[in-house]
Amino acid sequence: MGGVRLLLLYDILRWEEKSFIDTARKLGVDIIPLHVPTVFGKVGDKSLTGVGEVDVALQRSVSFYNSLESTILMESYGINVMNKSYTIMTCQDKLWTTSLLVRNGVPTPDTYVTFNHDTVYRIVGNGLRYPFVVKPIHGSWGKLLALVDDEEDLRTVVEHRSFMHNPMYSVYYVQELVRKPGRDIRVFTVGEEVPVAIYRYSDHWITNTARGGKAVPAQIDPELEDLALRAAKAVGGDFLGIDVFEHPEKGYVVDEVNAVTEFRNTVAVTGYDLTRKVLEHLISVARE
Amino acid sequence: MMAKCPVCGGEVNVPDDALPGELVEHECGITLEVVVDGDLVGLKPLEGVREDWGE
């Protein structure tokens, strides 16, 4: 697998990034870690960045803005970055993701949107029923999600949001509360394959492992595999972490898609070498 | 190499091949981030990242 020069874009060196560096070196891949917070460069001219000739790049920045903007900069040099800027942007915006999924026939939880604090009350009764979930359109790790059981809960959420200065919080992305069987599924796609998945068990309605959800290996049946690949195609992603709910009436539904996904808990409980799988895919992309 | 914890002043063992952005747990309980400026290697408390992707 030697001969390939891989650029690793990162900001914080977590388990995943170390794993990519260690595994790439074992595979004979020439991996070049690039610390995004200390990079500077001219758009379209990579000489200032210190980035030499590379065949392909892997985006691993934790910060959304670091990941998106450094990808755009690298793309200005003609570097093929996994995932590409379009995918990073669409996956960061939950509404954009849901829109692309729906337009491509991928089932999702019923989702409603409004753009004003006062208007959100009008959604209730016009399709949406309590309880439901209000989510920020940006963000992950299950942060700032609000479970709304009744009008009093909604009034509280609206009041808090109305005092938040970020205009993002005047956009209401509201979803039916899916009665999950105490778990959800994190499915990973690499290229056109679905190599591994985990259940995330939790007594809490938020099941992210970052919020204490317990990871357990999951079975990938043909329906789940097909769903994950269609979701990946919808957002144009190469290496994704796709969150799937088991809806009691609709079956599998895609909740979110992560374009710079963590996977240390997945490797720990499944033993699957996802790092190597991603690197092998990158090498094949570089050689196309 | 040895460095000083910017929080407690205690000694911190930083791997010789540490990269900028690498995290070092210190016995005082703080998580430190490796900072590289030319040939100089330092440490700063990890401030965390506000916008993120998770598992």
Image (cartoon, rainbow, N blue to C red):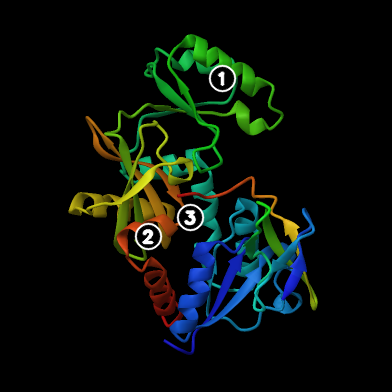
Query: Which numbered disc flags the more N-terminal residue, 1 or 3?
Result: 1
The mark found on residue A157 in the picture is 1
Labels 2 and 1: the sequence-earlier one: 1
Residue A83 in the figure: left or right of residue A131:
right
> The disc numbered 3 marks a residue on which chain?
A
Count the marks: how many? 3
Extreme residue in the top direction: A152
How many C-alpha atoms fall within 10 Å of the one at disc 1: few (<14), some, or many (≥20)? some
Q: Which of A79 and A159 is in front in this view?
A: A159
Please give left or right for residue A236 compared with residue A30 in the image: left
In this rendering, position of residue A276 left or right of residue A87: left
**Secondary structure at numbered mark 1:** helix
Query: Does the residue at mark 3 contact the one at mark 2 (Cβ under 8 Å)?
Result: no
Q: Where's residue A192, x and y in %?
A: 32, 64
Query: What amino acid is at disc 3?
Result: Ala
Q: Quadrant of the N terminus of chain A?
A: bottom left
Label 2: chain letter: A
**For the C terminus of chain A, which image quadrant?**
bottom left
Query: Between residues A31 and A136, which one lies in front from this camera angle?
Result: A31
Chain name for mark 1: A
Residue holding disc 3: A259
Secondary structure type for disc 3: loop
* First-in-chain label (3 vs 2): 3
Q: Mark 2 points at which residue?
A: A268
Looking at the rendering, which quadrant does residue A32 occupy? bottom right
Q: Is mark 2 on a helix, strand or loop?
A: helix
Q: Position of residue B50 (x, y in %)?
A: 64, 45
Q: Which amino acid does label 2 sit on?
A: Ala
- Asked whether the viewer can see residue A41, the reply is no
Q: Residues within 10 Å of mark 3 (few under 14, many from 20)?
A: many
Q: Residue at horizontal 48%, vertical 45%?
A: A210
